[in-house]
Image (cartoon, helix red, strand yellow):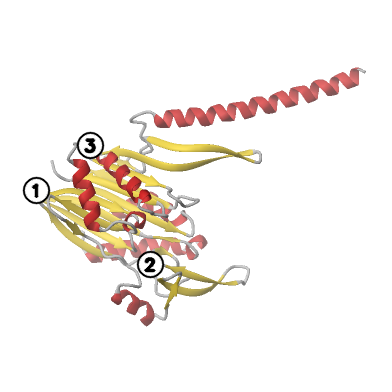
Amino acid sequence: MPHALLHFERFFVSKMIRKFCIFNVCILFLLFGFLQSMPGALSYSTFSTFELMFPSSRVCCEARKIGNTFEMKDYSRFGSFFEEKGGFVSEIGARPTQQDTCAFAQDSELGVDFFGVFDGHGGDAVSSFLRKNYFKKFKKFYEGNLDEDFFIRMHADIDAILRARPWANYSGSTSVTAFIKQEGDSRFLTVANVGDSRVIVVRKKGGALLSSDHTPYLKGESERIKVSGGSIEMYDGVKKVYQLVCDKSGKYFNRYLAMTRSFGDFDITGITSEPGVMRYELTGDDLYLILASDGLWDVFTNERVAEIVREESAGGISSEKISRILASKAIDAGSTDNITVIVVKLAE
């Protein structure tokens, strides 16, 4: 009898401990969500002045129990930065996973403001790597000149690091980055683009496109792929770069890529991270800088995005709110991709 009571007590205590642990895990998740929802709860790391990398001032997510574990799934991240002159949203959209990332930094020592959107594919490994390391590489290489040669050398160095990562053979990321720098009495915007993410400047009238989409539909890009030994094929009604690749187990499978340039994707012939670089002098007619992944541009023209920004900003709303409106309207318009948008107010 005493043995039976001892067994019962052990069972009862063990059961209570399990319930207590599960209860506390739930409380921790709820507390995490509450703290992240508090205004101004920015996560940042310090460079020479300060750097904000994906500040989750508010995070909309849910905790789901899968087996004996909990999985946090982020549906949307959004926030503001640079004293609310800038704002961003990164929306999962209709996709099962979020592969987009973004980054921004302000460095008073270099006199440079930096913004970047990285649209991953085959997972978020490469886009996450770029979010964490792109600006660090910029600071290492920067000597005062933002010309094409500078970005080619910097991108080649990032490529060399990624080639040592096996996961970069089968996954990749676009990269569209913008740098604002004061030079004398003028402000210049320099854009380095790889892939089909895009940058525009919204002006008082119209807008300025500051990047070219690197896809097989661009004649020079399709020719470059073919000259390098790669192939272009139609897949689901869309021109894509094609490669028959072999995985570690020796199995062959088809890989299709909608873009002709990216970081990673080393198993596809002809893919390069060499950027297209554009330089633009900002004037008093320039209102907003917009960087976004193709989840926005798939459903909206440059002109329509500029129109929406002008309409919404007329009410004096924040850059963050504008970014969220753009993403919401893109989803309503039928976008099925992840959507990441950075909006920066240029006018004083």
Query: Can you give x and y, in whole percent of width and height, for residue 154 in the image?
Result: 31, 61
Type of residue at label 1? Gly
Q: CA distance from mark 2 to mark 3?
A: 35 Å
Residue depicted at 50% across the width and 51% down the height = 96
**Quarter holding residue 86:** top left
Q: Which mark is residue 284?
A: 1
Disc 2, disc 3: CB below 8 Å? no
Question: Which quadrant of the rendered structure holds the N terminus?
Answer: top right
Lower sequence index among marks 1 and 3? 1
Mark sitting earlier along the chain (2/3): 2
Q: Secondary structure at mark 2?
A: loop
Image coords of residue 213 (percent x, y): 30, 65
Q: Residue at x 42, y 37 (%)?
A: 59
- Pointer 1 with pointer 3, Cβ within 8 A: no
Residue found at the very far right of the displayed protein: 1
Location of mark 2 (residue): 259
Q: How crowded is the residue under tag 2: few (<14 C-alpha within 10 Å), some, or many (20+)?
A: many
Camera sees residue 327: yes
| Amino acid under disc 3 | Ile
Of residues 327 and 61, which is closer to you in this image? 327
Quarter of the image for residue 208 reads bottom left
Q: Quadrant of the C terminus?
A: top left
The location of residue 137, given as percent across then percent down, is 33, 54
- Label 1 CA crowd tier, 10 Å (few <14, some 14–19, many 20+): few
Which is nearer the eye, 156 or 94?
A: 94
Q: CA distance from mark 1 to mark 3?
A: 20 Å
Crowding at mark 3 (Cα within 10 Å: few <14, some 14-19, many 20+): few
Mark number displayed over residue 317: 3
Quote the CA–CA distance across marks 2 and 1: 34 Å
